[in-house]
């Protein structure tokens, strides 16, 4: 026991917690470190709060974006359904259309066509439109109209987009053309019925004169000179009858038989060659103003020459031979037509006369048959054109014959 006590007394004494010299022991934290730890814990707590706040905000944004995405998906789904329904309706509409619809790409190949187009033109898919035109279509005298077998088709080509696509619309106008031809024929027959009484009057007068002259030729005591004079008058009346009947037949027939392509300048040259000597003989200044610039028309050249000659002869009768008389034959082309004008500086006419000028048997000249201008209008209509007159009393007259020209 003593030995243990001695040992304990001889051992080193345990220093106090605070130390005798004011230093920190191995298991203690200094005030500076404690302050730093507290600051670090504060910063950590603040960052943790900010992170929690950011996470909560992020969750809110995710929730909002999810809702917006759901709304956008709903709208897209609705638009898709609407477009699908529209596509279905358009497909049904194209399938039900009686007109043909052909869609061309920028290279001119057929991208799609509806059943009506396939029925009218045959199979067109994946073919070039130029091949379809060459193999299936035949151009007619009317611009935009073609023959396909026994059918008559009206074809219109329209640009589809900026990329060069086109859409071709094909209409079967076979029945419409037949009805148009029949209506024109019925109109001519109706006009002939209305003209029957007038024609009888027109024929009776020269026929009565011819019979009277021919009756005088039966007199055996008639001197030779008188006999020749009466015979000439008889022949003149008979020729008048013949011309009246020929004009009537031309008006009744209406259509123009035989067609060819020719330049407007050639037509004007032929008219000038025929009419210029007559104008010079009457002391009338005749001018040809040809601005057709190679314009080509398709039609009956003889019929058009006759119609324009009639207009020129009317102008010749309308001007006063006093040295200042002037007749102009002019041609002015446009994009799809050419207008041939016959202008004179004669006495002109009032509005009532101008309105009746193209009526059959209406004439202002004693020796006129009243069918010349009616025939000219018939020729213009048979070529798909028109004829009209502009005039005022004392201000001359201008006849305008408009014809469709050949497009390239």
Image (cartoon, helix red, strand yellow):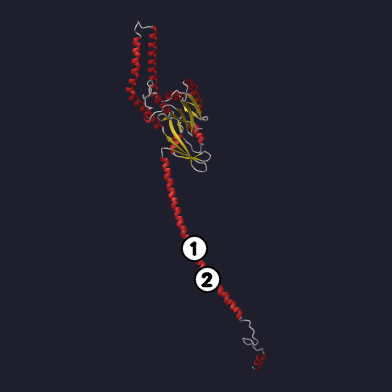
> Is 16 placed above or below 123 here?
below
Residue at point 43% right, 47% down?
86
Q: CA distance from mark 1 to mark 2?
A: 18 Å
Farthest-out residue, front? 322
**Which dot marks residue 61?**
1
Are there few (<14), some (14-19), or many (20+) residues within 10 Å of tag 1? few
Residue 30 screen position, x and y as percent: 61, 81
**Which dot marks residue 49?**
2
Residue 28 screen position, x and y as percent: 61, 82
Name the image quarter holding the N terminus. Answer: bottom right
Which one is in front, 189 or 373? Answer: 373
Q: As drawn, is 358 to the left or to the right of 167?
A: left
Judge whether residue 232 can be spotted in this image: yes
Residue 247 screen position, x and y as percent: 39, 21
What kind of element bears circle 2? helix
Are there few (<14), some (14-19), or many (20+) residues within 10 Å of tag 2? few
Which one is in front, 390 or 64? Answer: 390
Residue at point 46% right, 55% down?
73
> Is 214 placed above or below 148 here?
above
Among the two numbered marks 1 and 2 on one chain, the one whose residue lies closer to the N terminus: 2
Farthest-out residue, bottom? 2
Q: As drawn, is 3 to the left or to the right of 263?
A: right
Farthest-out residue, left? 197
Which one is in front, 300 or 226? Answer: 226
Residue 82 screen position, x and y as percent: 43, 50
In this figure, what is the number of numbered marks?
A: 2
What kind of element bears circle 1? helix
> Is 242 placed above or below 408 here?
above
Judge whether residue 263 can be spotted in this image: no
Res. 149 image quadrant: top left
**Which dot marks residue 145?**
none
């Amino acid at each position: 026991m003593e030995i243990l006590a001695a040992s304990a007394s001889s051992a080193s004494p345990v220093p106090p917690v605070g130390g005798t010299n004011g230093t920190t022991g191995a298991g203690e934290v200094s005030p500076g470190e404690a302050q730093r730890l507290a600051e670090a814990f504060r910063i950590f707590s603040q960052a943790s709060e900010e992170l929690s706040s950011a996470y909560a905000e992020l969750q809110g944004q995710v929730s909002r974006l999810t809702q917006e995405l759901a709304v956008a998906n709903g709208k897209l789904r609705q638009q898709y359904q609407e477009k699908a329904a529209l596509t279905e309706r358009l497909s049904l509409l194209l399938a039900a259309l009686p007109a043909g619809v052909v869609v061309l790409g920028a290279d001119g190949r057929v991208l799609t066509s509806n059943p009506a187009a396939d029925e009218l033109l045959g199979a067109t898919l994946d073919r070039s439109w130029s091949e379809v035109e060459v193999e299936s279509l035949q151009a007619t005298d009317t611009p935009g109209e073609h023959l396909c077998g026994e059918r008559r088709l009206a074809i219109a080509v329209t640009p589809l987009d900026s990329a060069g696509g086109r859409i071709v619309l094909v209409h079967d106008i076979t029945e419409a053309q037949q009805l148009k031809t029949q209506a024109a024929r019925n109109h001519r027959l109706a006009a002939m019925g209305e003209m029957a009484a007038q024609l009888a009057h027109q024929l009776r007068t020269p026929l009565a004169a011819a019979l009277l002259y021919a009756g005088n030729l039966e007199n055996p005591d008639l001197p030779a000179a008188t006999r020749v004079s009466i015979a000439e008058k008889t022949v003149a009346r008979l020729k008048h009858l013949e011309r009246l009947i020929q004009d009537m037949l031309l008006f009744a027939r209406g259509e123009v038989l035989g067609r060819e392509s020719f330049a407007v300048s050639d037509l004007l040259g032929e008219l000038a060659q025929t009419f210029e000597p007559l104008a010079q003989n009457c002391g009338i200044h005749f001018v040809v103003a040809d601005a057709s610039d190679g314009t080509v028309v398709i039609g009956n050249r003889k019929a058009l020459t006759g119609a324009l000659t009639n207009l020129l002869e009317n102008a010749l009768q309308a001007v006063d031979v006093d040295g200042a008389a002037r007749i102009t034959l002019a041609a002015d082309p446009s994009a799809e037509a050419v207008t041939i004008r016959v202008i004179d500086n004669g006495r002109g006419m009032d509005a009532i006369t101008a309105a009746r000028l193209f009526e059959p048997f209406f004439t202002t000249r004693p020796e006129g048959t009243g069918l010349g201008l009616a025939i000219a209008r018939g020729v213009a209509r048979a070529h798909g054109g028109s004829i009209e007159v502009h005039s005022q009393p004392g201000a001359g007259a201008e006849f305008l014959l408009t014809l469709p020209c050949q497009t390239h």
